[in-house]
Structures are given as structure tokens and as C-alpha cells.
Amino acid sequence: MNADRLHGVLVRQNRPGRDTSWGRQIYYMHTEPTALHRLLRWAEQFPLPADLRLGEGSMPRRTLRPRPRSGVPARENTPRPVDADVVRLSATTLIWTLTSPNRFLRDRATKALVQLLLGYPDTLLDLLDRFLRQDVAQVNDPYLFERLILAAYGVLARIGDVSPQLLRQLAELLLEHVYADSDSPAHASRNALVCDAATRIITMAADAGVITADQAAAAAHPHACPPVGQAPTEEQIKERYPRGRQPAGQSWGTVLSSLSHFGDFARYRVQPAVDRFSMLPRSTPRPAPSGNVATIRPVYGPNTSPRSPRACPKQCGQHWGHPKPCSPSSSSPLWRAGFSMTFSTHCSGNASYRPPRTSSSSTPQSMPTGRPGG
């Protein structure tokens, strides 16, 4: 009944199952007097290795003097060496707390892991191999991967003078399982934080000369990634998640709510990917960069407003695939969209627009520059 058994139990569950059981149980444990809270405090106060301690003249060393009991004289509590297996088991439990949706718990566990593993770099290598190679498919949790690799970088940065052999082994492990295998759940293309932390370790190894420049180039952007595939149709979603009373997690309402603005999936996964659309048709060739649009100016004058068809240059029609994109007709792409866009956006395809004006000005105007509202 130790951390190895805990690892075996959690690794057999899928991610939703772990979140509903393990994630809910440990959510507040870092602030309550529990076994996990004691483990966190013990790891946070773990003694530094001798080579990382301050010199004798730098700062007076503190010695813990326990309160005497029953007349027994107090003894100095000097740090004793801890077996590497004890550190490995303790770190395994802390690593599994990195799956918690509680960011403050993940922050404490990440810092505790760095403090705990400073004197045990070989144990760090074993843990990375366990979670990133042996059981990576069963773990399949981006929170755990990003924080574990970040803790590994924190250990290397704190140690400073890292063993070249250890640094080479860590870099090769990350190159093989974070960059080479695009099907791995821990692949760099799936998580920017994983990529950032792993790149720092690989850069450190390249600077130390323990890996070649060609090996380090594998961490450069862009990264190979698995094909996204075709999105399911609405009929397929309805067939898979029928309406009516269904078990939890299998109803149509669950899918809809996850895609609404109240759902975390929609806010953190969908919205960053599809928040901004270009209003240019997909059949239209990519427009020239916005720096070349200065020669295409709208014809503003006393009788033309920014929304007037007369103010639309002929060059805009080439980009929109419409002879009169600004004309007030049902076939005009701009008029149908209901927005009065700047002409720099018309011709550059920058997907930024301004709301329709309520009244037109009778004085000449200059072409707007920069981002709307900027």
C-alpha cells in the first residue's frame, strides 16, 4: 500500500474517471491537515544537498531544536540522508497531484518536486522515463506532462553544474518521447508549456555539448503533428449523444454545454482556435501583406461616407471575388455581413472590423490605420 500501488490504480483509469474520483478527493487537501498536506510540507522543507548550501560565512545555519518533553533534554535535529526509494515514492504521489484542476495545488506540488529531487537526479530520470515512456498512453494528462517537465528543468537550473551524462540522458529522452513520436500524448505539438520546458532542457544540453546541433534542431518549430481529421457532423453527434434522459456524460446537453461560453472546453480549447475568422472567401488567393496596401486608398470626399459604394476602390473587388463588394445589395459580401470595415482590412484580409456608423460625415477623412480601438 504505497505510491506504486497508487500509481497502478490511477494509471488504469481514464482521464475523466481520475478527474471525478482522484481529482475531487485531493482538490482541497493541500490546505487541510491531511496526509497529502504533510507530504507537501515535508518535500517543501527537504534539506538541500551539501553542494547547494550556502557557505558557512554567508548566512547562519538554522538548527531545529525540538521542545523537551518530560524533562528529557532536547537534541539537535540534524538532517539525515533519505533513501532514494523513499524519494521516488514520495515524488510519485506528488506527480499524480499535478493532475488536479486546482492550480494552487499544482503550483505547490511543482515547487515541492523541485526541492525534493535536487539531490536525486537519477530518481528524476527514472520518473521521467516512467511517466513519459512506460505509461504515457495510460497517463494521458497534459497537466501532468507540462508540470513534470517543468519540474525537471527547475531541478537542472537549480543544480547548475549538472552531470554531462545525466543531461544527455534527459535530453535524449525528451527528444525521443516529446518530439519524435507525434502520436504520443506528451508530444510537443499538443501543449505549448510542454514544448517550452522541454526546449529549455534540450537547449541546455546543446550548450553543454552533450548533444549535437542536429539533435537539438528537432526541438525547433514547427513540430510535426498528427492529422486533425474530419469533424463529426451534427447527425453523428446526435446519434452518439441522443437527447433525453441519458447517463451522466452521455447526453446531448453535456456536449452543448461544453461548447457554450460557460464551458471550459469552449473557452480554453475552441475559442482560441476559431475565435477570429477571415471574411475573405476560401477560394480567394491570399492577399498581399498589409504593408503593401498604402497605395489602395478609399475615395473619401464630401459626398462619400466610409460606407458609401463610391468609396470602395476597384482593387477590393479582386480580393472579394465580387465586382462591387461594398454595394448595398444582398449579394455584396461586406453589406451582407453588416459591418463597415476599414479599407486596409478590405484589401489585406485582416479579419478586424468596425461596427456600422450611425451617421456619415460631410468632411474628408483619412484612411484609418492600426487596429480598431488601438
Image: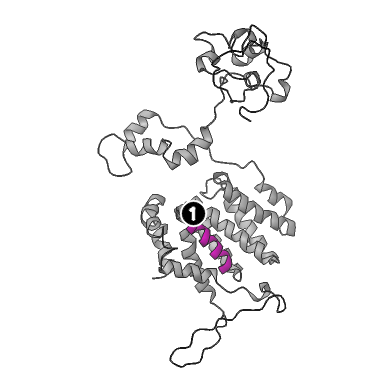
Residue 309 in the magenta stretch? The answer is no
Mark 1 burial class by Cα count in 10 Å: few <14, some 14-19, many 20+: few
Tell me if 321 is positioned left or right of 16 in this view. Answer: right
- Looking at the picture, tell me which residue is in the foreground, 275 or 227: 275
258 above or below 70? above
The residue shown at (61%, 14%) is 306
Q: Which residue is mark 1?
A: 103
The residue shown at (51%, 49%) is 185
Tell me if 4 is positioned left or right of 118 in this view. Answer: left
- Looking at the picture, tell me which residue is in the foreground, 73 or 180: 73
Q: Give percent across and percent down for residue 16.
A: 39, 50
| Main secondary structure found in the magenta portion | helix
The residue shown at (64%, 79%) is 61
Q: Secondary structure at mark 1?
A: helix
Q: Quadrant of the N terminus?
A: bottom left
The residue shown at (67%, 27%) is 370
Q: Quadrant of residue 117?
A: bottom right
Q: Give percent across and percent down for residue 199.
A: 65, 51
Say which amino acid is labelled 1.
Arg
Q: Quadrant of residue 359?
A: top right
Q: Give percent across and percent down for residue 263.
A: 42, 40
The colour mode here is one colour
- Looking at the picture, tell me which residue is in the foreground, 240 or 363: 363
Q: Which residues are magenta?
A: 104-116
Residue 115 in the magenta stretch? The answer is yes
Q: Give percent across and percent down for residue 232.
A: 41, 32
Q: Quadrant of the C terminus?
A: top right
